[in-house]
Amino acid sequence: MIERYSLPPMRELWTEEARFRRWVEVERAVARVQGDLGLIPDEASRAIVEGLDRVDIPRLIARAKEIEARIGHDVLSFVRALEEELGEAGRFVHFGLTSYDVVDTARSMAMRDALAILIDALDRLRAAVWEKAEQYKLTPMVGRTHGVHAEPITAGLKFLLWYAELSRDRERLLSAKEAISVGKISGSVGTYAHLSPEVERRVCSLLGLAPAPISNQALQRDRHAQVLTALAIVGGTLEKMATEIRNLHRTEIGELLEGKPHGSSSMPHKRNPSTCETISGLARLLRANALAALENMAVWHEQDLTRSSVERVVIPDSFLACHFMVHRMTEVMENLKVEEERMRENLGMTYGAIFSQALLLKLVERGMARWKAHELVAGLARRAQEEGVPLGELASRDPECSRFLSGEEISELTDIRYFLRWVEEIFGRLGAG
């Protein structure tokens, strides 16, 4: 991921140095456990653990790259560089392991920690959205379906809808975190031929992971697909929010505005929803990466390398992009301008036609055939917009409508409070933020 779309602390988690540190941490834990169990000489175990505690990671990386330039294998180059660092004890480093014992276990540690960072960031966004929902709980605005005025809602309900979805996103991330918080120290094909399940149990415990119940040369990629799919769903939620803000930011609507809009280099008057547009674009990347993770589930037999190149790109990039998107959307929500007066203006644009369903249903309830009631109210709604006369006024003057409904009833049915009477109950379902 390019630096433009990455932020700390997520950025630091996916650096080359961080990756090597995690590999070293896995090798240190294995050597310690193997020494405790008498699988390698105790003095060698102590020398490896002490040596890896003080190893110079940048120097180790440089040496590993020199070796890799000759042999073309990154983990083997890493192990040979460790051997050189550790001297005589170095022959016992990586003892009985396969590359993916180190790579997959270390990657699980990174993804676990990345999910913890992302969940914390999402909680800040949820708090910002909840605050807006509470603040504008009873602020009326028009609801739109197919881009056309439908019935009244409140701005708070729109924000509350986002809050509820973000809360479900959080649960999905927690589930993904549990799924990926596993390691494997089971050898070349998962049979512990040169290790033992006890080594795996102890190593994983030291690293804060659970041992995978079964593996082959690698952890199974349904776990990784679950994580990247969860990130893509978060991206979908953020894109939905961003798309709505972008639509309501339009000059013709003007109900929601990015608080820190970016203008045009050529047109000084422009106030563009650029942050939301960036979020919408990056959501596409998350979906594409999730598809790649799903493709990675299938390999030949116990392992091949078709997934390796893909994961080096899509896993860090997805975490970096998703974290960036959550942070930027938090900034948008914290600084969002809610134009209440414009919302009121837009509510009146149809002269009450948005109240039509209440009249329709009450006429049917009072005995008018539904088709007839529908035609009657549709005609009144069209006239209201064409003549600039409120629907309620036209309905009260209409002889057919007046046969079934009193003027007081029509007034009640075309009052916005009728449509928003359950807002408090809807909020109650979500509880406090």
Image (cartoon, rainbow, N blue to C red):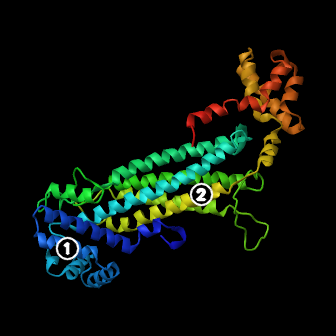
Res. 158 mark: none
Quarter occupied by residue 106:
bottom left
- Seen at 34% across and 50% down, the residue is 179
Query: Is the Cβ of the residue at disc 2 closer than 8 Å to that at disc 1?
Result: no
Quick one: SS at disc 2?
A: helix
Residue 71 lies, in percent from the top left, at: 24, 81
What amino acid is found at the position of numbered circle 2 in the picture? Met
Q: Which residue is mark 2?
A: 329
Give the answer, above or below, for where 18 lies relative to 433.
below
N-term mark: 2 or 1: 1
Q: Is residue 265 visible?
A: yes
Q: Where does label 1 land, which residue?
A: 48
Residue at coordinates 28% horizontally, 66% vertically from top-left?
103
Query: Which structural element holds mark 1?
Result: helix
Q: Residue at x 71, y 32 (%)?
A: 420
Query: CA–CA distance between discs 2 and 1?
Result: 46 Å
